[in-house]
Amino acid sequence: MSQTKLSTQSLNLHFGDKHVLKGINIEIPANKVTALIGPSGCGKSTLLRSFNRMHDLTPEAYIEGKLLLEQLDLYDKKNTVTDIRKRIGMVFQKPNPLPKSIFDNLAYGLKLHKTPKKEIPDMVTKALQESYLWEEVKDELQKPAVQLSGGQQQRLCIARAVVLRPEVILMDEPCSALDPISTKKVEELILSLKDDYTVVIVTHNMQQAQRIADYVAFMYLGEVIEFDECEKIFHQPQHELTRNYIEGTFG
Amino acid sequence: MSRSRETKDWIFRLIFKATGLLTIALLVGIFLMLISNSIAFFFDVSLIDFLGGKQWSPDKGGGVYGILPLLASTGLVTLGSMVIAIPLGILTAAYLAEFAPSRLQAILKPLIEVLASIPSVAIGFLGIVLVGPAISNVFGTLSGLNALNGSILLAVMALPTIISVSEDAINAIPKSYREASLALGANQWATLFRVTLPAALPGLIAAVMLGLGRALGETMTVLMATGNAAAMPTSFLDSVRTITATIAIEMGEVPFQTTHYFALFAIAAVLFIITLGINLLGEYLANRLRKYHA
């Protein structure tokens, strides 16, 4: 296994009196695609969102244990959440472009992090090229982003994460609102991203996990049941629950 | 059987159409009434003297009917009230929608709505008893009944509308926008001012227009609190007399169908056109902004 990028140490998360994540220990390798799979409600999105502290705004969320980005303690009070989120980007389930132009959707994050103004256009162009969106939008960068198709919007959202040059990109079922052709484009994009980024993706789609993931974590009722190379999870699962789930017995 | 059910649909469609048309008919009717009564005025006084005149003295000689002092009064009082009410209203709404703990929200929201139900006469008393003396103390003026007093009171009256409509507009912004912004490393401040409020702008404009309409049309409060001097104001500390107050004061005294009588319709028509224009402008701006939304 390559170097560890993200890890948790006996992570427990409660929403009020609901115990959602139970004693999670996971080491997510750098520059790989790691998929989190499991039935609805198993806590995979909750785990994903705890890496960039998206639970901070939920008053009833309570977290125990440690989450680390390499050696950096993500929940240490010394570390500001805005810097952490610059290093750990996120793409959501439903494409959520901001109500701004295509260009401004990408420029927004750069401006937040005080990028010198004259560098912004080149960085936007580069991120759009890397997200395979440039050819489709280069003549209409000032167009409202909501006028793009759903698939284009999602690639824009990925470009928006990429433009900040994060180390990790979290993706919460990024293709679940997309048609098969858009899904294929996004999957190709994800595969090309892992040279430069560590990708953690939540997916409901077993085929998708097999197509793009290097590592797979199977979660059930708030626990990581099994975590291994993709190949092994799908062909020699060690745990009966994992086998039942990937064979479609439940979930 | 099914025939009669279709007939029912047809009847209901008719009723709904009628209620919709009634509103339009009322609007057109009021406009026509104002215009038709104003026309007689312009037989006696030229449009230029009316719109350009700096003096409003119906009792002087044949009567001098320059609308400028009244227009300036209305403009000054309304401008002042909006300068106070817009930032206060939108920030309060933002606080309520984004930051206030739900407990506090549950108390504040009904309280703000109560504020809207206070009759304008009572607000007028507030101006005479409280705001007036305070102004004359602070600024050392003889009387506290002036444009500033009216602005403060109108701000109080416009606030509940602005807050409540703005809050709805902010609440209607999907959570996904905020998440997108926060996930890019924005703090809550940047998210509010660069994403949430701009996205809510069409609704905020509507809120301001409603508040502005309330302030422009308010009569009793300004009549009681602004001193009623129909002279060209030079500052917020001057006594002023708005278009609405002028109509309210003079309509009771004026002989029927005299030049003075028709003059009051003419200034009402001007106020109507201003309000209509502001509303159309607001609608246009809001529509232009909406293209950025899904």
Image (tube, grey):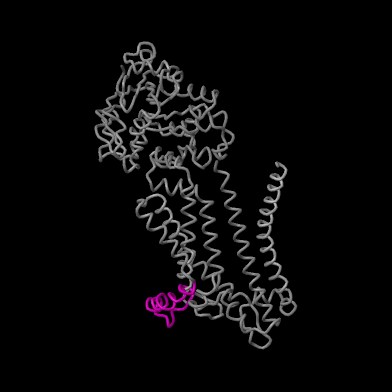
Pick whichever, A145 or A128, lies toward us.
Answer: A145
Image point (70%, 44%), residue name = B6
Q: Point out the image quarter for the C terminus of chain B.
A: top right
Magenta part, dominant SS? helix
Image point (63%, 72%), residue name = B268
Q: B78 above or below B293?
A: below
> Which residue is situated farthest in the top direction here?
A236
A124 vs A136, left or right, is left
Q: B132 above or below B117?
A: below
A176 vs A196, left or right, is right
Q: Looking at the rendering, which quadrant does residue B275 occupy?
A: bottom right
Residue B148 location (% of width, % of height): 46, 73
Q: Point out the image quarter for the N terminus of chain B.
A: top right
Q: Looking at the rendering, which quadrant does residue B292 occupy?
A: top right
A82 vs A184, left or right, is left
Residue B285 location (% of width, % of height): 58, 53
> Which residue is situated farthest in the right direction here?
B43
Q: Is residue A128 rendered magenta in the image? A: no
> Which residue is situated farthest in the bottom direction here?
B61
Residue A41 location (% of width, % of height): 38, 30
Q: Is residue B123 rendered magenta in the image? A: yes
Pick whichever, A59 or A49, lies toward us.
Answer: A59
- Magenta range is B120-148
Q: Looking at the rendering, which quadrant does residue A224 occupy?
A: top left
Residue B160 location (% of width, % of height): 46, 62
Q: A9 above or below A210?
A: below
Image point (59%, 72%), residue name = B71
Q: B104 above or below A60?
A: below
Q: How many marks?
A: 0
